[in-house]
Amino acid sequence: MKKVAIIGAGGFGRETAWLLAQLPQFDFVGFFDDKEKNGAPENLPILGKVSDVHQLPGGTGLVIAIANPQIRQGIAKQIDRHFEFPNVIHPQVVLDGPQNSVGRGNIIAAGVIITTNVHIHDFCIINLACTIGHDTQLSNYCSLMPQCSVSGHVTLGERCYVGAGARILQNLEMGADTVVGAGAVVTKSCAAGKKLMGVPAKEYVD
Ligand SMILES: CC(C)(COP(=O)(O)OP(=O)(O)OC[C@H]1O[C@@H](n2cnc3c(N)ncnc32)[C@H](O)[C@@H]1OP(=O)(O)O)[C@@H](O)C(=O)NCCC(=O)NCCS
C-alpha cells in the first residue's frame, strides 16, 4: 500500500479521501491545508499547512484536491520536484482503451466515462459522472465539475474550468484559462481567458 496525503481539506478534498478509501493500493495518511482546522465532519487528520508537506517521509504520494486550476498549479509548481503525484481513479471509471493516456496527479471521480483516443495530461480533476468523447485532450490543470459532457475532438487548454453540468460540443478548442459556467452549452471555440455562460454560451465580461 502506498501512503498518500491530500492537499486541500475542503469538500472536494474530503471526497477525494472517500475515493482513496475505496482504492486498496493507497493508505490515506491525512490532509495539508492552510485554512481548515479539522477534517470535519469525518474528523480526518490535518497534518499541517501546505508548506509542511516537506516533513512527510520520502516515498509518500501527494494528491492536490483543489478545484481552482490556478491555485492547484501554484501548489504543484511549488512542491513538484520533491514528490510523487499518483493518479487517483475511482474503480467505477470507464477509461480502458489502448489509445487513451493519463499523465500524473489526476483525480478521476466515480462514474466518469472516457471513450477512445482521449489524452488527459497532468493534474486534472474530472469530477463525478463526466463524459469525455473521442479524440479529446485535456491540458494540464483542467477541472471538470460534476456531470460535464465534453464531446468528441475537443481540446481544452491549460487551466480550463468547466462548471457542473456544462456541455461542450464537438470539434471545439477552448483557450487556456477558459471558465465555462455551470449548465452552459458551448457551441463555439474561444480564445484564452474567456468566461462563458448560458445556452448557447456567450462570453461574459465582468
Ligand atoms: C460562471 C461562474 C464561474 C461565474 O462566477 P462569477 O464570475 O463569480 O459570477 P457571479 O456569481 O458574480 O455572477 C455574474 C452574473 O452571471 C450570472 N451567472 C453566474 N453563473 C451563471 C451560470 N452558470 N449560468 C448563467 N448565468 C450565470 C449571475 O446570475 C450574475 O448575473 P447578474 O449580473 O445578472 O446578477 C459561476 O457562476 C459558475 O457557474 N461556477 C461553476 C460552479 C460549479 O460548477 N460548481 C461545482 C461545484 S462541485
Image (cartoon, rainbow, N blue to C red):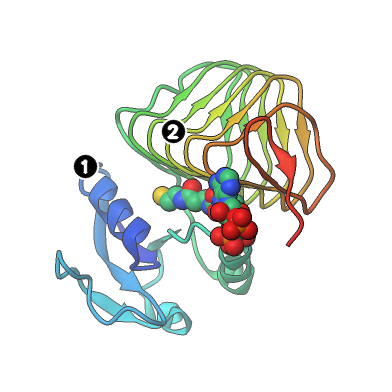
Q: Amino acid at mark 1?
A: Gln
Visible in this render: residue 1? no
Secondary structure of residue under mark 1? loop
Q: Residue at x 32, y 52 (%)?
A: 16
Q: To which residue does mark 2 refer?
A: 147
In this rendering, position of residue 142 left or right of residue 48? right
Vertical comparison of 193 with 57: above or below: above
Q: Residue at x 62, y 21 (%)?
A: 151
The percent coordinates of residue 161 (x first, y second) are 60, 49
Q: To which residue does mark 1 refer?
A: 22
User: Could you say which is closer to the camera, residue 162 or residue 78?
Assistant: 162
- Compare marks 2 and 1 and give the one earlier in the sequence: 1
Q: Residue at x 62, y 70 (%)?
A: 74
Q: Residue at x 58, y 23 (%)?
A: 100
Q: Residues within 10 Å of mark 1 (few under 14, many from 20)?
A: few
Vertical comparison of 46 with 183: above or below: below
Cα separation between marks 2 and 1: 21 Å
Quadrant of the image for the C terminus? bottom right
In this rendering, position of residue 159 left or right of residue 115? right
In the drawing, what numbered circle is on residue 58? Answer: none
The percent coordinates of residue 59 (x first, y second) are 40, 63
In this rendering, position of residue 189 left or right of residue 145? right
Outermost residue toward the right? 191
Secondary structure of residue under mark 2? loop
Q: Residues within 10 Å of mark 2 (few under 14, many from 20)?
A: many
